[in-house]
Amino acid sequence: MIFNTTLGFMNFGYSLSIFNSVLAYFSSTVFPDISDAQMSLIASITTIGAAFGAIVGGMITAKFGRRVPLIIGDFIFMIGAALTLVDVYGSMIAGRFIMGVFIGANTHNEPT
C-alpha cells in the first residue's frame, strides 16, 4: 500500500513534467501534421482529466474506502499509458485523459 501511494505521487509529477519536455519531439516526428492547438490539447488534457478524477475520486472513496480505488486505479493508469504508446492522435488524447483521471482520483485517495 505504501509503494502504491508513493508511485501515485510520482505518476502525477512524471506525467505533467516529462511530457512537456518531449513536445518538440512529438511535433516534429510523431505528429508532424498537427497544429499547435492540437499539441496543446495533448499536453493539457491530463490536467482536465485530473480535475474530473478528483471529483469522481471523492465519491468513489466515500463508497469503497481507499484501498480498492487505489488498486483499480493502477490498472486504469496502465490502460491509459498503453493508449499513449500508439501513434494515433485520438488514442493519445484518450490515453492522456485516462491517465489524468487516475492522477486526480489517486491524489484524492492517497494519504498525505
Image: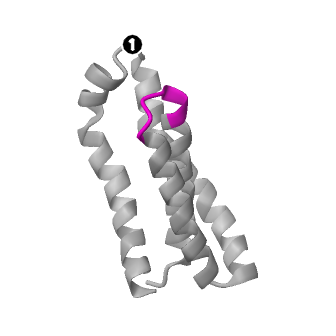
Relative to 84, residue 87 above or below:
above
- Is disc 1 surrounded by few (<14), some (14 to 19) or many (20+) residues within 10 Å? few
Q: Is residue 33 magenta?
A: no
| Residue 92 in the figure: left or right of residue 33 | right
Q: Nearer the viewer, residue 18 or 29?
A: 29
| Residue 14 in the figure: left or right of residue 72 | left
Q: Position of residue 94 (x, y in %)?
A: 56, 40
Per the rendered image, the range of residues in magenta is 85-91
Residue extending farthest right: 63
Q: Nearer the viewer, residue 52 or 75?
A: 75
Q: Is residue 89 magenta?
A: yes
Relative to 112, residue 31 above or below:
above
- Tell me where residue 43 sits by quadrant: top left
Relative to 32, residue 64 above or below:
below
Residue at point 55%, 72% (across, down): 108
Q: Which image quarter is the C terminus in?
A: bottom left
Q: Position of residue 31 (x, y in %)?
A: 37, 22
Tag 1 secondary structure: loop
Q: Position of residue 59 (x, y in %)?
A: 72, 72
Residue at point 34%, 67% (across, down): 10
Residue at point 32%, 44% (across, down): 19
Relative to 14, residue 29 above or below:
above
Residue highlighted by disc 1:
33
Q: Position of residue 64 (x, y in %)?
A: 71, 81
Residue at point 50%, 43% (across, down): 83
Q: Amino acid at mark 1?
A: Asp
| Residue 78 in the figure: left or right of residue 22 | right
